[in-house]
Image (cartoon, rainbow, N blue to C red):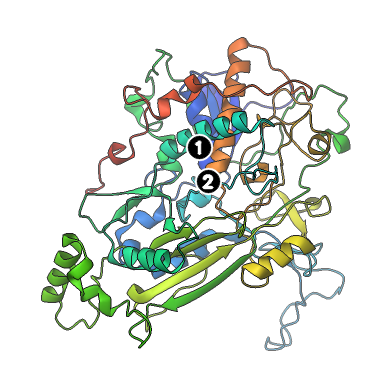
Amino acid sequence: MADLPLHHVHQDTGIAQFDVFIAGSGPLGALFARQLVDNGHNVVMVEIGDQDTRVPGAHKKNEIEYQKDIDRFVRVIQGALSTVSVPVSSAVIPTLDPSAWRIKDPNKHIISNGRNPYQRTYNNLGAQAVTRGVGGMSTHWTCATPEFLKRDTQGNVFERPVIYEAVADDDAEWQLLYNAARSIIGTSTTEYNHSIRHNTVLKTLQESYPDRNVQSLPLACHRLAEDSPYVQWHAADNIFGDMFDPAKKRKRNAKDVERGTFVLLTNTRCTKLHLTPDTSPDEAQLIPNLGRYITEQPMAFCQIILRQAEPTSKALVDDVTNFDDKPDWWEQAVVAYQEENPKDPLPIPLQDGEPQVTIPASYERPWHTQIHRDAFSYGETGPLVDSRVVVDLRFFGRQTGIQDNRIIFENDIKDGYGMPQPTFVYEPTTEFANESSEMMDEPGLALHLGGSTRLGRGNVENEYNASVADYNSQVWKFDNLYVGGNGLIPTAFGANPTLTSMCLAIRAAYKIHQDLSAQQLTAPDPAAPLEKTPEDWVMWTNDATDPNLPDHKHLRAPHRRV
């Protein structure tokens, strides 16, 4: 590597060699950085996109205009997403001037904007898209953070991966990790307790489906004040915490260890990594399962309008003004709104919080359901419909990973950022296609791509042979390469995966910290038992006396001046 010039970051910081390099600044990259920097390690992170929010990695939905009109945020999401792989089609446009330029060779195709001549339509994940920028997709995500459904008493795995074969050990490990991850991202189920629409939908579904465990959707957010109509949506900036605060650069943790140096390089592309495999560098065999066994989330979506009145059914909208069984805050909100807006025929206040309800996956119905109102890249109501009476129903199904379902990174085609162009080869398996059909409708939309860097247990032969890394997220055969993100999840899942991916990043960061502290990098041993995450490693996430305790409500002062 002596022939490669050093990046200017080394001269700028005076650091000849950083301890850790992280590619990507989304919530998982942020979590790796936060844990390692707070434990004294020097970290450099690169992001191929730019910082396009005032606070690095902040949620764009926190802008007041989108909280007042959620449907306007649809355009923000559409603008942020770039489709990964688009099959090419004829470049002949009959309405153009006949003298306009066109391709003369029928065997050649335009390759701009994700167009991919290797991509076939029938086995593409056509909706798969990426967000390039500080914070990644967390700058526009729904903030839903449910847990995965664990294996049943017969040992059947549903969503949550199995780290330890012993059920008690596995449950304890996951609970430790989930508790830490919820604190780090700031998950809550109570921020919509004083929403009329939320309580109307929640109560109606609980009464109609008493056996479905209908509950409030866990969300990474907090209400700005007790009676405020607005919430602060959490994103990668909440995980970074105060790492960008110049006054906190030398902050010490509970063990009196000074923070390491952290540098985030934007608009920076990493094209080569110096890795140290513990075997001969046969490139084709180093990571044979990379990009294979991918999974997607088939989805069904519809919108409904809250019922006005029917002879045999409850009139949900009219019941808003029936205060006999309503709490005081409900009556006060409706009366005050009607007095201020006598010409509005709808009694629901304009800034009443949207419904945020879920029916979690179960063994009988292993799909995740969200009944809410939110902005996606589809599903806006339009100006002729009052969004206050619209409810979105989203059903997220599962697909298992098989070897032939894969991503291929083409060597002879580059995307718009100069990186190898991905090609998808994917077809749903019959078993899970039928499950999706039972869920509601035919599968189609890929939301959370999984399995591309899947984890496996080294002492379980079929998992080891089909995985990229161990359950410390360390790539097999390498002593200095780790992976992170939703691609690690080896199971079929319907629920939002971010919280579970955070759990895996907590384990991985601990292993990296161990190796760096011992000044000895070790490759994963498939035969060695996996170490449990010590409580001491995650103590900072829930200890009120710890200087690094996540404090989302007081992370930074409200922005009220320029």
287 and 56: which one is in front?
287
Amino acid type shown at disc 1:
Tyr
Please provide percent x and percent y for residue 161.
65, 41
100 and 461: which one is in front?
461
Q: Residues within 10 Å of mark 1 (few under 14, many from 20)?
A: many
Which residue matches tag 1? 178
Secondary element under disc 2, as helix, strand or loop, is loop
Residue 202 occupies quadrant: bottom left
Q: Residue at x 57, y 20 (%)?
A: 513
Q: Residues within 10 Å of mark 2 (few under 14, many from 20)?
A: many
451 and 347: which one is in front?
347
Apparent side of residue 333 relative to residue 424 in the rendered image (left or right): left
Residue 478 occupies quadrant: top right
Q: Quadrant of the N terminus?
A: top right
Apparent side of residue 544 relative to residue 217 in the rendered image (left or right): left
Please provide percent x and percent y for residue 543.
36, 25
Please provide percent x and percent y for residue 502.
54, 38
Q: Residue at x 47, y 26 (%)?
A: 538
Q: Could you tell me how many numbered marks the image carries?
A: 2
Say whether marks 2 and 1 touch (CB < 8 Å): yes
Secondary element under disc 1, as helix, strand or loop, is helix
Residue 519 visible to an observer of this rendering: yes
In whole angstroms, how far apart are the C-alphas of marks 2 and 1? 8 Å
Please provide percent x and percent y for residue 28.
54, 39
Residue 532 occupies quadrant: top right
Which residue matches tag 2? 147
Amino acid type shown at disc 2:
Glu
